[in-house]
Image: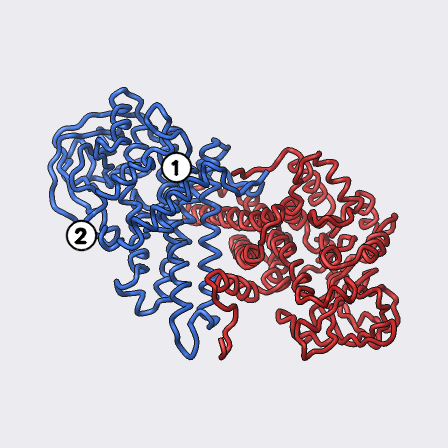
C-alpha cells in the first residue's frame, strides 16, 4: 500500500545531504560559478555520496535511484541546483557504461570513477533517442564534441558509424575553445577534438538497457530540477514576506500569494512524481519507462513555470545577480535540456492507461 | 516508500469499478438527459443500500463508533494495524466518479453530514444519527453551511440560532445543499451572534419534518443533473438543545469551529479525486474512440497531435492523482494535512477541466452531441469541482496562510501586524 515515508537509512541520507548543502553550498554558489566544483566534489566523495545507486561490487552503496533522487533533490533544494549538477556530472557517463557495456575495462573505469580516480565526462552532443547529431559522425569528422569538463581523463560519447550508433570512450583528445553558455557556469563547456577512441558497446538502441540508461538520466536531471523548483519557491516566499509594497509585505497581496501557493503546490507535486518514478524504476514496475518519461516532461512543465515565477515575485531584484533566482531560472533550462530536449520523448508513452 | 495498492484494496476497487460501469454510468446518462435528480424512491438506491455501499458510511479511523459497512470493510481488509481507509476512500471516489459523479453524490447514507458528526458529536448524538440509517430503507444525510451571502467566507453566515429554554430557534436560508430535500438529517451551521465571527458559530442536527424547516427550491444546474441540490429555509425552526452538535461544552474552547473545518481535510482530497475520475472517464472514452478509428498510430499531423494530447492528459491525471493520494495518506497516518488537502483541491480540478475540454475539442463537431454524451456530460459536470468544497481561490488562501505560518509569520495582514 502507499507509503510516502523515508526509511531510517533514507532519512539519515537526506539529513546528511541537507546539512552538507547548507554548510558547503548555499552561501557560496556564486564562487562555484567562478571557480568550479573540484574541491566540493572531493568533499562529496569523502562523505560517500558518489556511488549511492551502484552495486557494492563497483564500490557503490547498493541502494537505488530513489536514494540517488533524494540526494540530488535535497542538495539542489538546500544548496544549489547548478552546483549539484556540476558535482555529479560524472553520473551520466557512468550510467552509460554501467547499463550498456559489461566489459572488464568499463567495470574498472566505473570503480575508479566512483573513487574519484578518473575525471569522466559524457559528451553532450550525440545522445539523441535513435540518431546522433552530425557532430558525432565517426566516419566524417569528430571535431566538435561538447564536454562539460575542463580536464577530463576519459570522454564517453555516442557516435554514429555507418548509420549505426555505438558507445565509445576516448583517453586521447585535445581541448578546443571554451563555449559561451547560458547557465550552469560551474560546469564550463568546451569543444574537444577526439584523437583516439575505443568502441565499448553497440547494438543497444531501442533495447531495454538503452531505456534504463535514459531513465537513469531522466531521474537524475528531474531530481535536480525538482530541487531547484522547491528552493526557488521557498526563496520567493521568504522574499515576499519581507518586501513591502503598497503598505504591506507583498506576500499579503493575493496576486502574489496565489502565485506562491501554486509554486508550492506544483513543486510538491513534482517531488512526489519524482519519488514514485524512481521507485517504479528501482522495482522494475511494469511501464517504469513511461513513468520516467512522464517525470522528465513534467519536470519541464513545472520547473519552467516555478523558476520563472520566482524571478517574477522578486521583480527587478529577481533579474539581477544579487539574488539567486535568476541563476535558478537559467540553470533549470540548461539542466533539463542537458542531454537533449525532453520534448523528443513526447509520443513515446507505451501505456495509455491511467489510475491504480 | 511504496506506491502501489495492496491486493485487498485492489479487489475492493475492482468491485467498485464493476458497479460504476454497470450501474452508475447508464443511470447517470439517463438522468443527465432528463435534467432532473434521480427520485429518492428509485430502486437503485435500495439495491446499493443492500450492498452496504453509501456515502459517509466510513470516514477514517477516528476512534468513534464504527458503522456496519465500515466494520465489514475492515474485516475484508484483514487485521492490519492501519487499513488506510482515507487513501482507499479517495481511490474509491475516483472510480465511482468515473462511473457517474451525479449518481455517486446521490448515494444514500450519512453523506457530508458524517465528517462533522464524527469529529464533533457526543456519543449519544452519534448513536441517534447512525442508528437512523440502519434498516433496509435508503436514507440521506446532508451538510448545510453555504448561504446566499456566504460561500467561501464561512465566517459570514447569517442563519441565526437563538436559545429559548430547552430549544434553539433557527432562522435563515441555506443553499446548494446536496441531497438537502431528501435528507433525514441535516447538519446546519448557524450563528448565535454574527458579531462574534467564527466564535459564534454552532452546528445543529436538524431532522426532516422539524416544524419551521422547509425545502425552498431544487436547483437547475449546468451538470450533475442526477444529483439533487436544494435550497433550505429555516423559519423559527425549533431544535431541541440536545441536538446542538457536541453540546454546549464543545464551543467553549476556540477549537470548536476549527474542529468542524477539519472535516475539509478529509473531503477536499476526495473531491479532487472525483474530478480526476470524471476527467479519466472522458479521457478513456476519447482514447478508445481514436484507437477504434485507427488514429493512435496513423501518420498525419492531426493523428500525431491526438496521440501527444492523450499522453499529456494521462500524465497530468497521473500527477494530480498522486497529490490527492499523498493528502489522504497523511490523514491515514494521523499527520497534519490541511495544506496538502488544499493543494490537492487546488491542483486537480483545473487539470481535470483542461483534460475534459481537450477531449471535447479533439472530438470536434460531434464532441458536444449525443454521439459522445459521456464527454460533453463530463464537460458540464467538471466545472463545479473548482468551485464547491472551497473554490480554487479559497484553497490558495489556505495554502498561502500555511506557508506564511511555516515561516513564523502571521497568516493575515492587519495594520497592527
Q: Nearer the viewer, residue B393 or A161?
A: B393
Q: Which chain is blue?
A: A
Q: Tell me what residue is drawn at x 39 percent, y 37 percent.
A: A215
A284 left or right of A341? right
Give whichever of discs 1 and 2 has the lower sequence position: 2
Counting the numbered discs, the total is 2
The quarter of the rendered structure image containing the N terminus of chain A is top right
Q: Position of residue B11 (x, y in %)?
A: 67, 35
Residue A163 shows up from this direction: yes
Residue B364 shows up from this direction: no
The quarter of the rendered structure image containing the C terminus of chain A is top right
Where residue B244 sits, quadrant-wise, is bottom right
Q: Position of residue A261 (x, y in %)?
A: 48, 62
Q: Which residue is mark 2?
A: A180
Q: Chain of mark 1?
A: A
Callout 2 secondary element: loop
Q: Tell me what residue is drawn at x 66 percent, y 67 percent.
A: B254
Q: Position of residue B172 (x, y in %)?
A: 76, 76
Q: Which residue is mark 1?
A: A215
Q: Position of residue B145 (x, y in %)?
A: 71, 67
Q: Which chain is red?
A: B
Q: Tell me what residue is drawn at x 67 percent, y 61 percent.
A: B259
Q: Separation of disc 1 and disc 2 at Cα?
A: 29 Å
Where residue A27 sits, quadrant-wise, is bottom left
Q: Nearer the viewer, residue A326 or B100?
A: A326
Q: Give the answer, above or below, for where A66 lies relative to A323.
A: above
Amino acid at each position: 500500500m502507499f507509503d510516502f515515508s523515508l526509511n531510517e537509512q533514507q532519512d539519515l541520507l537526506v539529513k546528511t545531504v541537507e546539512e552538507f548543502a547548507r554548510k558547503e553550498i548555499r552561501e557560496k554558489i556564486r564562487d562555484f560559478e567562478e571557480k568550479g566544483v573540484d574541491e566540493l566534489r572531493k568533499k562529496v566523495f569523502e562523505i560517500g555520496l558518489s556511488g549511492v545507486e551502484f552495486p557494492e561490487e563497483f564500490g557503490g552503496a547498493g541502494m537505488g535511484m530513489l536514494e540517488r533522487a533524494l540526494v540530488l533533490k535535497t542538495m539542489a533544494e538546500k544548496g544549489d541546483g547548478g552546483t549539484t549538477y556540476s558535482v555529479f556530472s560524472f553520473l551520466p557517463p557512468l550510467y552509460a557504461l554501467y547499463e550498456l557495456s559489461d566489459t572488464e575495462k568499463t567495470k574498472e573505469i566505473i570503480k575508479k570513477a566512483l573513487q574519484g580516480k578518473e575525471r569522466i565526462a559524457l559528451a553532450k552532443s550525440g545522445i539523441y533517442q535513435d540518431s546522433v547529431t552530425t557532430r558525432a559522425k565517426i566516419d566524417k569528422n569528430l571535431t566538435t564534441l561538447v564536454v562539460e569538463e575542463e580536464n577530463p581523463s576519459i570522454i564517453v560519447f555516442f557516435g554514429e558509424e555507418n548509420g549505426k550508433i555505438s558507445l565509445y570512450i576516448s583517453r586521447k583528445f585535445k581541448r578546443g575553445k571554451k563555449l559561451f553558455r547560458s547557465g550552469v557556469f560551474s560546469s564550463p563547456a568546451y569543444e574537444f577534438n577526439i584523437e583516439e577512441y575505443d568502441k565499448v558497446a553497440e547494438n543497444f538502441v531501442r533495447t531495454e538497457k538503452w531505456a534504463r540508461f535514459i531513465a537513469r538520466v531522466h531521474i537524475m536531471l528531474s531530481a535536480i530540477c525538482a530541487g531547484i523548483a522547491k528552493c526557488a519557491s521557498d526563496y520567493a516566499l521568504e522574499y515576499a514576506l519581507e518586501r513591502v509594497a503598497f503598505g504591506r509585505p507583498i506576500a499579503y497581496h493575493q496576486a502574489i500569494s496565489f502565485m506562491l501557493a501554486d509554486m508550492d503546490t506544483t513543486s510538491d507535486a513534482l517531488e512526489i512524481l519524482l519519488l514514485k518514478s524512481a521507485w517504479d524504476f528501482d522495482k522494475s514496475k511494469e511501464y517504469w519507462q513511461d513513468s520516467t518519461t512522464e517525470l522528465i516532461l513534467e519536470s519541464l512543465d513545472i520547473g519552467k513555470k516555478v523558476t520563472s515565477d520566482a524571478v517574477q515575485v522578486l521583480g527587478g531584484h529577481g533579474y539581477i545577480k544579487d539574488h539567486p533566482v535568476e541563476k535558478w531560472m537559467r540553470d533549470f533550462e540548461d539542466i533539463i535540456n542537458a542531454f537533449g530536449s525532453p520534448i523528443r520523448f513526447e509520443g513515446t508513452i507505451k501505456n495509455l492507461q491511467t489510475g491504480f | 516508500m511504496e506506491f502501489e495498492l495492496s491486493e485487498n484494496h485492489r479487489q475492493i476497487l475492482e468491485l467498485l469499478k464493476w458497479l460504476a460501469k454497470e450501474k452508475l454510468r447508464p443511470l447517470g446518462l439517463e438522468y443527465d438527459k432528463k435534467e432532473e435528480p434521480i427520485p429518492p424512491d428509485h430502486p437503485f438506491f435500495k439495491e446499493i443500500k443492500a450492498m452496504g455501499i453509501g456515502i459517509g458510511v466510513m470516514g477514517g479511523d477516528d476512534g468513534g463508533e464504527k458503522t456496519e459497512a465500515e466494520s465489514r470493510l475492515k474485516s475484508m481488509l484483514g487485521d492490519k494495524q492501519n487499513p488506510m481507509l482515507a487513501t482507499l476512500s479517495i481511490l474509491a471516489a475516483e472510480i465511482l466518479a468515473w462511473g457517474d459523479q451525479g449518481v455517486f453524490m446521490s448515494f444514500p447514507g450519512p453523506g457530508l453530514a458524517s465528517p462533522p458528526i464524527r469529529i464533533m458529536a457526543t456519543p449519544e448524538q452519534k448513536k441517534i444519527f447512525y442508528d437512523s440509517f440502519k434498516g433496509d430503507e435508503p436514507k440521506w444525510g446532508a451538510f448545510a453551511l453555504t448561504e446566499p451571502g456566504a460561500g467561501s467566507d464561512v465566517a459570514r453566515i447569517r442563519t441565526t440560532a437563538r436559545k429559548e429554554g430547552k430549544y434553539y430557534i433557527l432562522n435563515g436560508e441555506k443553499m446548494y445543499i446536496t441531497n438537502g430535500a431528501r435528507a433525514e438529517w441535516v447538519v446546519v451551521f448557524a450563528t448565535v451572534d454574527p458579531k462574534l465571527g467564527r466564535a459564534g458559530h454552532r452546528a445543529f442536527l436538524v431532522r426532516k419534518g422539524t416544524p419551521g424547516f422547509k425545502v425552498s427550491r431544487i436547483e437547475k444546474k449546468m451538470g450533475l443533473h442526477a444529483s439533487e441540490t436544494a435550497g433550505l429555509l429555516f423559519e423559527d425552526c425549533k431544535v431541541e438543545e440536545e441536538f446542538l452538535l457536541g453540546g454546549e461544552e464543545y464551543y467553549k474552547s476556540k477549537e470548536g469551529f476549527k474542529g468542524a473545518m477539519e472535516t475539509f481535510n478529509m473531503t477536499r482530497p476526495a473531491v479532487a479525486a472525483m474530478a480526476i475520475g470524471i476527467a479519466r472517464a472522458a479521457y478513456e472514452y476519447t482514447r478508445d474512440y481514436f484507437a477504434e478509428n485507427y488514429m493512435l498510430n496513423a501518420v498525419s499531423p492531426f493523428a500525431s497531435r491526438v496521440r501527444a494530447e492523450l499522453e499529456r492528459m494521462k500524465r497530468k491525471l497521473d500527477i494530480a492523482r498522486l497529490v490527492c493520494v499523498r493528502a489522504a495518506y497523511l490523514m491515514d497516518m494521523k499527520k497534519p494535512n490541511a495544506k496538502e488537502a488544499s493543494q490537492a483541491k487546488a491542483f486537480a480540478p483545473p487539470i481535470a477541466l483542461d483534460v475534459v475540454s481537450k477531449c471535447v475539442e479533439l472530438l470536434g463537431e460531434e464532441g458536444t452531441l449525443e454521439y459522445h454524451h459521456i464527454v460533453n456530460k463530463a464537460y458540464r459536470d467538471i466545472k463545479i469541482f473548482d468551485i464547491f468544497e472551497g473554490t480554487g481561490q479559497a484553497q490558495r488562501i489556505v495554502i498561502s496562510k500555511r506557508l506564511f505560518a511555516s515561516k513564523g509569520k502571521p497568516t493575515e495582514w492587519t495594520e497592527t501586524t
